[in-house]
Amino acid sequence: MHPKRPLLQNPVKPIEVDAGKTIHELLADMGQTAFQGKNLGKALSVWSEMLKERTVIFLGLAGAMVPAGLRKIIVYLIQHRLIDCLVSTGANLFHDTHETLGRFHFQGTHLADDVKLQKKGIDRIYDVFADEVEFIKTDNFVSDWAKSMTWESPITTREFFQRLGDYLDKHKQDDGILSSAAASGVPVYCPAISDSCIGISLAHNRSNEWPSPLIDVIQDVLETAHMVSGDFKTGVIYLGGGTPKNFIQQTEVTATIIKRGTPGHEYAIQITADAPHWGGLSGCTLEEAQSWGKISPTARKVSLFSDTTIAFPILVNGLAGIIKAQKLRRAEIPRFKFGETVDITWDH
């Protein structure tokens, strides 16, 4: 055989325009092209494979994705059990609480005069505006709720957000991430809870000697290590990087340290706009993670270099399209029981 032949087996196939084409059909076509379009198509393929196996699927949610309009996409994934565990920044969970209560983020412009915005009580997240008065109402909602609770200390962030989600479910104006997670049995972890308005609300309570929980983030580490230890595979989906990404990555390392060695995450999708050559975690490749044993040497993986607000809605709508067409159903869904360890049972 000519030495070039093995490398020249799959021609790039130009995309045909078809007004009746579904999103998942378009993504399948894109998977036969190149560059980030190909990676977007591959991401759908990897996620679909996760669902066909006995897999615990983690989603890492960084950035300001809720203010950018992605809340209902995350809600859909939780309610349909297309993910099994969410690890998020505290900011996203605060913004989720804000919207669940019927409040809004507003379309704005990054060209605004920020000094004038500050005088008017308007906060800016790039081209998103928020009413500072309304934010304070959400701060007070969290603070007042925490004051009304009896806290057994310490508790994990999972327990904290389960309770907040239960409370939001009774007061919601719309389905939210936390309310849906609490109702669906999807654990939510927030390793940097102090780095958010939720952390500020709890600090406000403590400074006034009002009830607030003592949160044990180390138990979060142990719980998630147990969640990746067993006779099943694990998959990860990273939206951006930061603390959520590393927290999920390190589950494999922690599992090894506590004598529950695992092969590394066996499915991985990363959507990031950051570059790896700066050395930061948000841009680091999945291959780099293999050097730590965080990603399996044989993992099905794809890094998609794109703005999450562009790529993720397309990806999830493609996944929903395959499910609606009955070309895909989840093989087994994990259910978690938390105690000294984490017991996992599987629903068919």
Image (cartoon, rainbow, N blue to C red):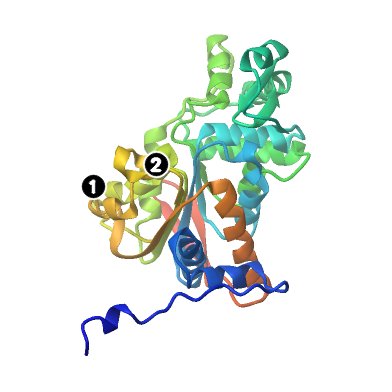
Residue 348 in sight from this viewpoint: no
Q: Is residue 149 left or right of residue 47?
A: right
Circle 2 crowding by C-alpha within 10 Å: few under 14, some 14–19, many from 20? many
Residue 69 placement (x, y as % from top left): 66, 43
Where residue 114 sits: x, y (%)?
62, 17
149 lies left or right of 220:
right
**Image quadrant assignment for residue 150:** top right
- Residue sitting at 41 percent across and 44 percent down? 245
Quickly name the residue at label 2: 282
Apparent side of residue 330 relative to residue 243 in the rendered image (left or right): right
Q: Within 10 angstroms of label 1, few (less than 14), some, or many (20 or more) residues?
A: few
Position of the N terminus by quadrant: bottom left
**Comparing labels 1 and 2, the label whose residue is closer to the camera:** 2
Q: Secondary structure at mark 1?
A: helix
Left/right of residue 6 with respect to residue 238 in the rendered view: left
Element at label 2 = helix
Name the outermost residue toward the bottom.
Answer: 1
Residue holding disc 1: 257
Residue 331 drawn at (x, y percent)? 53, 72
Relative depth, front residue between 235 and 287:
287
- Please say whether residue 127 is visible from this viewpoint: yes
The amino acid pointed to by label 1 is Ile
Q: Nearer the viewer, residue 44 or 336?
A: 44
> What residue type is disc 2 on?
Ser
